[in-house]
Amino acid sequence: MVIFINGKYIDKGDVRISPDDRGFLFGDGLYEVVLAYNGKPFRLEEHISRLKRGCEFAGIKLENADEIKEFCRSLIERNNLKENIANIYIQVTRGVYKRAHRFPPEGILPTVYIAAAEFSPNRVYQKYGIKVITVPDDRWDHCDIKTIDLLPNVLAHQKAFDQSGAEALFVNGGVLLEGTHSNFFTVMEGKVWTHPESNKILSGVTRRAVIEICNKLNIEIVEKAIEYIEISEIDEAFVSSTTLEITPVVNVDDIKIGNGRPGELTKLIQEKYQRMVNS
C-alpha cells in the first residue's frame, strides 16, 4: 500500500513517524476522511476547505493545502482503487519538535500524512438500522474543529459497542447534539430536524449533502436543537457521515423509534444520496 507523507509517496510499511511529532505527543493536529466512489473523491473541495479552516484556527501553517487534492487522486491511482470505494485519510500535525506546550519555532514544517484504502460501507446497518445510546457531552467547546484529539469520542463509542450499540449521541443540557463520528437527524411531522451549525457540533460534509437533498425534494429542514425528552415523538431518525453515509437509527437508549424499522423518508434520502455520490 502506497501512502503520502511529507512530499513523498512510499510504502506504508516503510513509514517512520518521530516520537517527537506533535500529533503523537499532544494530539496537536487536524484530520479529514473522504470517500472516493469509482475513483472520484466525493466533495473533496469541501473537506480541504474545512481542513484549511481548522489549520487556521490552530495556527498550523499548511502551505500546500490545495495540493492535497492531487495527492489524494494520485493515491487512488497508485493503489489501484479506481474501481472501488476508497477511504482517504488525511492528517496534518504541527510537526516534529521537542516536547513543549508552546508552538515550535518558525521553520518547523507540519507533518502531512495521507493514505487511501479500499472501503466497504456497512450495508446491513443501512438496510436495517442501528441502535444508539446517549452519553453526557464532556468535550471541549470547539467541536466544529476536526481535531485528532478524540479521546471523549473513543470512550463514548466504546460504551455504545459494549451495550450492543453502533453509535453514541452526545447530550448537553438535555439537547441531542451529534454522534461520535456522525451528525444526527430526526423526522417529525414530515419535516427533517437537525442541530444547527455551531461550535457544539462538527458540521459534516454529508450533513450538508442531506440538507441539499431535502431542499431538492421540497422536504422542510428545521435546524433546531432536538430535546432528549422528544425522543418518543420521533417518527424516524438517521445519522450521516462520510463512512456511515446515511444510516437509519431505530432505537435510542432502548426507546424504539417509530415502528422500529427504517422510515420511508430516511430510505428516500438514502437513495438520493447514493445517486449523488455515484453520479
Image (cartoon, grey):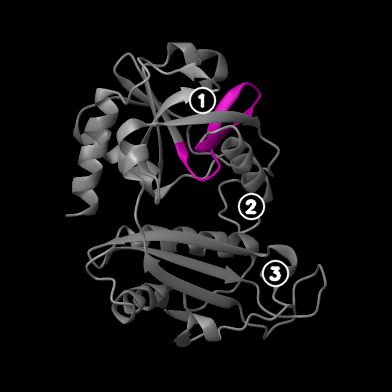
Query: Which residue sits at x=30%, y=35%?
Result: 127
* Residue 12: % across, % down: 50, 80
Query: Helix, strand, or loop for circle 1?
Result: loop
Is 178 within the magenta? yes
Q: Which mark is nearer the camera, 2 or 1? A: 2
Task: Note whether 273 is above or below 145 in the view shown.
Answer: above
Furthest residue toward right: 100
Q: Is residue 50 left or right of residue 163?
A: left
- Identify the image quadrant of residue 258: top left
Query: Helix, strand, or loop for circle 2?
Result: loop
In primary-sequence order, the first of circles 3 and 1 is: 3
| Front residue of this view, candidates 71 and 86 | 86
| Residue at numbered disc 1 | 225
> In the rendered structure, which amino acid carries the disc numbered 2?
Leu
| Residue at numbered disc 2 | 150
For the N terminus, give its image quadrant. Answer: bottom left
